[in-house]
Structures are given as C-alpha cells and as structure tokens.
Amino acid sequence: MPVVLAFHGYAMKAPDLLSVLEQAIPPSFLLISVQGPMTALAPGAELGKSRETGYHWGVSPRAEENRDIHRAAVEMGIKWSVEQGGDRSRVSLIAFSQPCSFNYRLALNPPEDISFRALVALCGGIPGEWKDPGLPSASSSRTHVLHISASADPFYPQEVIASYPERLTGRFASVQHIIQKGGHRIPSAAFPVISEFLERYG
C-alpha cells in the first residue's frame, strides 16, 4: 500500500486529525496519524473547567532539536507502516499548520535518502529561511507538492502566502498552490483535490 503520514497542528490530537483526513485520503492508502510529543492547553480552554489538552511539535526552544524530533517521528512512522504492509518507496506526508515547514525541510534530506512521493500542506507555512526559489536536492527533485491555504487565515495572511509558489517551485518536482475560502482550518472543499493529487503522485 502507498503510505500517508499525517501531522496535526498545535493543541490537536492524532485521532481527531485521522477522522478528518479519512475523508480526503484515497482508501487504497495506508493513513497514519502521528501525535506530537508535547502537551498544550487547547486555545480558549485555559480558564475553562475542562482545560482540554492537545499536542504539538515545538518541544524545545532550539529549532534544530524540534526538527530532529520530527525526523525521528517520521522515521518511526515509516518503520511501523512497512510492518503493516506499507510500500517504503511510496511514502507521502500531509500536515496541518505547525508541522508543514518541518515536512518541507525534511523532504530535502529524507530518511535513507528515499524521496517522499508527495507533500500536502494545509494552512501552514514554509521554512522562514527560504526567501528565494532555491534549488532542489536530489531527493526533493522527485517530490510533488500541494499547498492549500485559506483566504481568511489570520496566521498565514494573503500577503505572506502570495510568495509561496515562487519560493517552493525551485525546490520540488511540481508545486500546486490553492486558496480556499475560510479561516485557519482544514477546508472540506479541498478533500477531492487532495484525493486526486495523491492518486496521481502518491
């Protein structure tokens, strides 16, 4: 089976992301939702009685440590997927919000130098140091990208996302950037686009 490893955003939980993405990922794929290592109170729950918690990926003030933790999570996810019958040569990554930039960086230097087939980024950013089109690595030159933004996302406004296609295109095999109506959430209108993209490239 082709594999999709999914990474949730800040203060989310892996099962919640899984239930959403099951509507977007083709049924022929093995979908694995990976949970971040650090707990956080859900936004708005800080003063409430429930004090609901979620998880996130920013466990250290040192960026390189966070990237190492993310890389280890991807490596563990790949290993587990292969044990379940997943195809090691057909692994794609999908992320919502916070971990999108982690996936982009990792795609330039993936585990075992085996290219990811595809990256799907949902309402997230790109590495801050990528100011220009850049160049692909031997691995990322074979990876296809679908970046989906939202028209009213307060964290990634229009003036920020406008440059994403230019800053991504030079680093990957192909890049599609789609803007859906709405705020900072996973847009259900994008589900058919995601499914078609993964069927083609994943």
Image (spheres, grey):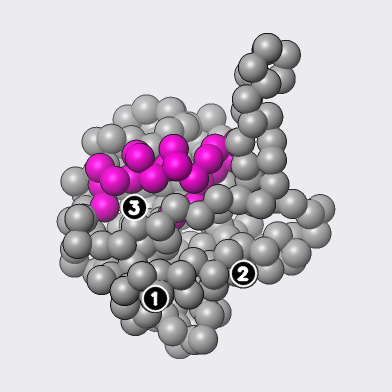
Q: Dot 3 surroundings within 10 Å: few (below 14), some, or many (20 or more)?
A: some
Q: Dot 1: what SS? A: helix
Q: Nearer the viewer, mark 2 or mark 3?
A: 2
Q: Which mark is residue 49?
A: none
Residue at (49, 86) in percent of width and height? 113
Query: Residue at label 1?
Result: 82
Q: Dot 2 surroundings within 10 Å: few (below 14), some, or many (20 or more)?
A: few
- In the rendered view, tell whether residue 53 sits above or below residue 44: below
Query: Residue at label 3?
Result: 177
Q: Earlier in the sequence, mark 1 or mark 2?
A: 2
Any magenta on residue 15?
Answer: yes
The answer to whether any part of residue 13 appears in the image is: yes
Q: Which residues are magenta?
A: 6-25
Q: Which mark is residue 72?
A: 2
Q: Earlier in the sequence, mark 2 or mark 3?
A: 2
Question: From the image, which quarter does the N terminus lie in?
Answer: bottom left
Residue at (51, 86) in percent of width and height? 112
Q: Quadrant of residue 52?
A: top right
Q: CA distance from mark 2 to mark 3?
A: 28 Å
Q: Amino acid at mark 1?
A: Val
Q: CA distance from mark 1 to mark 2?
A: 15 Å
Any magenta on residue 191?
Answer: no
Question: From the image, which quarter does the C terminus lie in?
Answer: bottom left
Q: Dot 3: what SS? A: strand
